[in-house]
Image (spheres, rainbow, N blue to C red):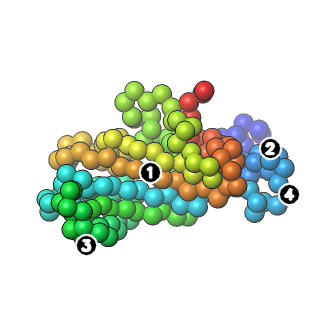
């Protein structure tokens, strides 16, 4: 009977795993009396800076389509607030794109990131613990978006990077790190 329960736990989605396994472990470790005090995921933000492709119309569409495939929703265009002559940027010019994932899409994305995307990164030896800030939020830079399983290699025209920021509702760095470890993030051992 225990084998059947273990197999059921492996097949459940990340939100169920959080509620059934992770919340009790965090309550036990940090001594929470209320389940609402336990750290949880708030949102995941995907960012792409357009950089050298600012002037190209095709590059803008390429980045937008890639973010749509990766996230499952339409990205927002980020515009420059100020003109910067050294970078040839004018106020109102599109300088990046971003997507904010919450709820079901957020948990699905993190599951795909941990189980499918990170193992595909070349020479991957684990995530750095230094990427976690004092509130427990985590940031990850990916040099090539082609590591995502949604991207077909024969459709790649031009490569660009991607930043993934995971916002966590935690009181401190230690709680955020423990939550991310229990969610399956492969951090390096010191």
Q: Estimate the x, y position of residue 4 in percent, counting from the top left.
A: 71, 41
> Contact, CB < 8 Å: mark 1 with mark 4?
no
Q: Is residue 177 above or below residue 190?
A: below
| Neighbourhood count class around disc 1 (C-alpha, 10 Å): few under 14, some 14–19, many 20 upward | some
Residue highlighted by disc 2: 29
**Marks 4 and 3, how far apart in space?**
49 Å
Q: Nearer the viewer, residue 102 or 135?
A: 135
SS label for mark 4: loop
Q: Residue at x 24, y 67 (%)?
A: 83
Q: Residue at x 25, y 56 (%)?
A: 50
SS label for mark 2: helix
| Neighbourhood count class around disc 2 (C-alpha, 10 Å): few under 14, some 14–19, many 20 upward | few
The mark that comes first in sequence, 4 or 3, is 4
| Neighbourhood count class around disc 4 (C-alpha, 10 Å): few under 14, some 14–19, many 20 upward | few
> Contact, CB < 8 Å: mark 2 with mark 1?
no
Q: Estimate the x, y position of residue 111 in percent, counting from the top left.
A: 52, 48
Residue highlighted by disc 4: 33
The mark that comes first in sequence, 1 or 3, is 3
Q: How many marks?
A: 4
Q: Is residue 72 at all visible to an observer of this figure?
A: no
**Marks 2 and 3, how far apart in space?**
48 Å
Q: Estimate the x, y position of residue 106 in percent, counting from the top left.
A: 51, 58
Label of residue 92 in the image: 3
């Amino acid at each position: 009977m225990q084998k059947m329960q273990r197999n059921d736990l492996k097949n459940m989605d990340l939100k169920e795993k959080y509620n059934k396994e992770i919340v009790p472990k965090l309550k036990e470790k940090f001594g929470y009396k209320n389940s609402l005090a336990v750290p949880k995921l708030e949102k995941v933000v995907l960012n792409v800076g357009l950089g050298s492709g600012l002037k190209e119309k095709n590059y803008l569409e390429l980045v937008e389509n890639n973010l749509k495939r990766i996230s499952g929703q339409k990205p927002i265009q980020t515009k420059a607030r100020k003109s910067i002559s050294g970078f040839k940027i004018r106020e109102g010019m599109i300088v990046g794109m971003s997507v904010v994932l919450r709820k079901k899409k957020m948990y699905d994305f993190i599951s795909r990131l941990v189980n499918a995307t990170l193992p595909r990164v070349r020479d991957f030896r684990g995530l750095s613990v230094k990427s976690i800030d004092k509130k427990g939020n985590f940031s990850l830079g990916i040099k090539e978006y082609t590591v995502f399983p949604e991207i077909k290699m024969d459709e790649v025209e031009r490569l660009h990077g991607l930043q993934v920021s995971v916002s966590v509702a935690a009181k401190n760095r230690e709680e955020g790190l423990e939550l991310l470890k229990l969610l399956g993030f492969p951090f390096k051992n010191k």
